[in-house]
Amino acid sequence: MFHVKPFILTLVVLLMAFSVKGQSGIEEKSNTMNGFFGFDGLRPNNPDLLYNQRFLKDSTYFYTKDSLEAEFREFKKVTFDYDNQGRLLLENEFEKKADVWLESIKRIFSYDNDGAVEYRVLKQWDSSNESFENQRRTFYTRNFMGLVSRETIEKYESNEWMLDSKQEYFYNAHYDISEEVSYTWLTPNMVWEPKRRKIREFNEDQELSSEVIQVWVDSLNVWVNMSHRRYEYNSDNQLINLLESMWNTSLEQWVEQSVQALSYNPLGQVENSNSFDALDPDGDTKESVEATYDEDGNLNITLFKEWNSDQNAWNAYERHVHFWSEYLIGNLDGADKNIECFFMNPHTVGLPWSCDELLENEVYLLSVYDQNGILHHSQQFRGRDTFRLTKNLNNGLYMVVITGGLTTHTEKVLIKN
């Protein structure tokens, strides 16, 4: 069941950035900042609360203004619909024109028997036909671990679906994405042509340390460097700096272009990120994103600002306001209390688990959270089967949450490798 709790929020790390139409110049800025840091969807900070409740985003409202003196005005909103298991079914996007909300885009999600997204469809409102028309759809292919190995995108033209592009993902031994390769479908030749790839490296803590982006040059039949990102962390393994460089062909070396710096609140949530020009280290900050959170750790308001050197002041050009619904998990009568799991605790990743009273043919989702409520890993298994955690985790105390159907069960696990 749902208890609606609207919150006016401020910055959280976004896992997904919404593409914005209309205000293209301004909106490209916020999308760039969102797409990199991801200011959305942080989990609640109270671990005891987290495993009995989930907060699902109900809607997001987008505001912009044309000058430093102007007032913010609404220009877009997105609402979200879920099923009774809390799975996202529908994103509804609206544009505001002449104080009227007009339907714009609809994103529909479909799930397979294991509860994973099988495909999604993007539809756009056609005012002449007064209906939503197909635009694109994305199919997800998964490997034996249930991780997405391929995204195949089709476009809708002449009343039929046609291949358009695809994205392939390759994983390392720790199940982190080590390489992404995107392709474009060439209809005349009926072949996939490489377009772009990302090559990632990780440090000893399995955190992303660098990322190289390359483009395919068909005439040379080679990958050519385009940009490079280097990630820096503090002693708490929090990302604090990102240095972005561009490849200089004539010099045959990387040239630093920009620096992104993050700061955190006492609960470990990102509260500010600033963008600097690496070529002018003594210069002013170029852009800034600020975030605030509610008492449950959900994102409240995301504020995007740019520095106006002529006025010697910050210009807040866009604001996102988020509203959340409280979703109660499982049976209210506590029917899951009979579940008992057997495993070594302290636990070494890789050793077996087994749990009594799980349904034999039910597919369960296992999620691993740290004490700040941050999700570190998830995997699926069938009830009554012996299973193992499939991701290496740093030493520490975690909450392992097992959900399936109306069942929710939690275990406090001390990882000690």
Image: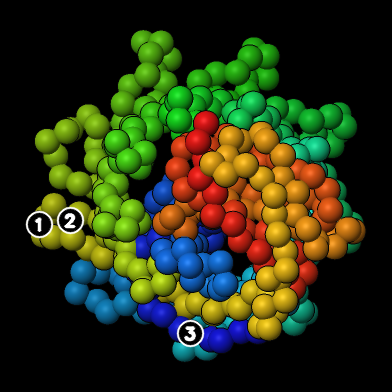
Residue 25 visible in this rendered orientation of the protein: no
Nearer to me, 200 or 174: 174
Is residue 69 something that shows in the picture? yes
Residue 36 placement, left or right of 185: left
Q: Does dot 1 land on a helix, a strand or a loop?
A: loop
Q: Residue at label 3?
A: 5
Q: Is residue 374 left or right of residue 378?
A: left
Rendered location of residue 40, percent (x, y)? 47, 61
- How far across and down, in percent of the image, does residue 394 sit? 48, 36
CA separation in Å, label 3 and label 1: 39 Å
Q: Mark 3 near mark 1, Cβ–Cβ under 8 Å?
A: no
Q: Position of residue 213 (x, y in %)?
A: 52, 28
Q: Earlier in the sequence, mark 3 or mark 1?
A: 3
Residue indicated by mark 1: 312
* Above-or-below relation of 248 to 160: above
The quadrant of the picture occupied by the N terminus is bottom right
Residue at the spot of label 2: 308
Q: Residue at x 51, y 45 (%)?
A: 414
Q: Vertically, is 109 above or below 188?
A: below
All told, the count of numbered labels is 3
Q: Residues within 10 Å of mark 2 (few under 14, many from 20)?
A: some
In the image, 412 versus 14, the foreground residue is: 412
Residue at mark 1 to residue at mark 2: CA–CA distance: 6 Å
